[in-house]
Image: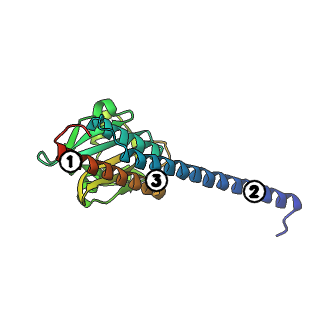
Amino acid sequence: MTISGRDLIQMLRDENELLKTRNKQVGSKLARQQQAFRVLARMIDKTRRMSADQTLPDILNDLLADVMHVCNIENGSLLLIDETAQQLEFVAVIGESHEHLLNHRIDIGTGLVGEVISTQQPVLVADVHTSPKWSSLIDQRLNFHTASLMCVPITIRDEVIGAIEVVTHMGDSPFDDNDLNILSVAGHLVSQALGCIEEHLRNTGDTHV
């Protein structure tokens, strides 16, 4: 088969455009990682400088806001375990579901977040509708259409006390392993901050940090 000069030039142009596209994708991922590192650094600094004037709900909301910024996502929640009731409570919520989800409770074993609580292992599901463990109860309650989900445990001294969950809409780009790594680091920082809060409350009996 003989390739004409014109065809060869077109092939080179197509290859050049493909390389440009790949370079843009790599550049975008690199920029996102750099942004995440900057926000994580701020989270570390904020954890060290937690104000005694902040209430616990304020701190939880601030920590979740930092996590959302790190992950470059709009919808997420922080849930804590109520051991007595064996339930998970949405103690901080950011995004469209804030009004309806804040302080809402679900059974401790519900869905993918329940699996994270049970196993103390992070979970990434690129398409929740392919997971038999995903629960659609919250989506049905809120008329929300979850596409992709990540969830990481919050632990203090190796004991799970809750979880952070972030989700994307249908039509958004799904999460990947790099996103989960970033969320896991952010979740570790939240665990450290809550560990400091718990110690302070235990020592002072105060409701402020």
Label 3: which secondary element: helix
Mark 2 — residue? 16
Q: Amino acid at mark 3?
A: Asp
Marks 2 and 3: which is nearer the front? 3
Sequence order check, earlier mark of 2 and 3: 2
Q: Disc 2 vs disc 3: Cβ atoms closer than 8 Å? A: no
Label 2: which secondary element: helix
Q: CA distance from mark 1 to mark 2?
A: 53 Å
Query: On the rendered image, what quadrant is the N terminus found in?
Result: bottom right
Sequence order check, earlier mark of 3 and 1: 1
Q: CA distance from mark 3 to mark 1?
A: 25 Å
* Residue plotted at (42% across, 55% down): 180
Pick the front one: 56 or 77: 56
Image quarter of residue 60: top left
Mark 1 — residue? 81
Q: Amino acid at mark 1?
A: Ile
Label 1: which secondary element: strand
Q: Amino acid at mark 2?
A: Asn
Question: Which mark is on residue 179?
Answer: 3
